Image (cartoon, grey):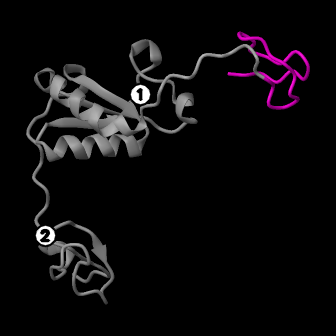
Amino acid sequence: MSYDYQVCPSCGDEFTLSVLHCARCEVALVPPHSIPPEPEPENFPEVDALECVRVGPLPWTRAISDALTQVGVAHRVQPDTRSPAEGGIDPKRFGGEALYGTWVGAEDLEAARAIDQQVFAVFETEAAPESSGAEACPACEARLGQNDLECGECGLVFG
């Protein structure tokens, strides 16, 4: 069987045939068929029997999944089709992107949540400062009240 690429046996990155060694791992590349397939995971329960750690777009899901894998926490990742009433998240919150959930067994939930906090701590933001009541509309610079949700001058809606 002929392939038009090679793979790194250490990290799995793919390379063109003209490359001989992995730039990251510095090992010789091999044909894809020479790497044994990943073993099938043990019979891990379906999401109905698991606890959800995080729901978000694919990059978020990959980040938490990678972190859980590094410490050996078994988990399941799959598209989250639950409605907000069922505990899901409205995809509009993420601009309509497909959302994925990361689920773990109840016995691993506390550890998984701690890992999740470490992974996403860099994205936590401080609470918004209190309004001084002397705010101005960014569109027309009209003076706004502390609780205004719409500019009385130009109609710009804040939200």
How many numbered marks, from 0 up? 2
Residue under the point 29% across and 72% down: 14
Numbered badge on residue 151: none
Magenta stretch: includes residue 149: yes
Residue under the point 12% across and 43% down: 41
Q: Position of residue 140 (x, y in %)?
A: 88, 29
Left or right: 59 as drawn, with respect to 157: left
Left or right: 124 as drawn, with respect to 153: left
Magenta stretch? 136-159
Task: Indicate whether 7 appears above or below 42.
Answer: below
For mark 1, does the 10 Å Cα neighbourhood hold few (<14), some (14 to 19), or many (20 or more) residues? some
For mark 2, give the secondary structure.
loop
Q: Position of residue 79 (x, y in %)?
A: 37, 35
Numbered badge on residue 81: 1
Query: Looking at the figure, which quarter contains the N terminus?
Result: bottom left
State how far apart marks 1 and 2 are (Cα): 34 Å
Q: As shown in the figure, which amino acid type bears the numbered disc 2?
A: Ile
User: Quarter-wise, where is residue 139 in the image?
Assistant: top right
Residue under the point 68% across and 15% down: 132
Q: Position of residue 58 (x, y in %)?
A: 40, 43
Of 149 and 2, the residue lying toward us: 149
Q: As shown in the figure, which amino acid type bears the numbered disc 1?
A: Thr
Task: Indicate whether 139 appears above or below 27.
Answer: above
Residue under the point 68% across and 21% down: 159
Magenta stretch: includes residue 68: no
Numbered badge on residue 35: 2
Of label 1 and label 2, which has the lower sequence position?
A: 2
* Residue at far right of view: 153
User: Quarter-wise, where is residue 102 in the image?
Assistant: top left
Left or right: 124 as drawn, with respect to 154: left
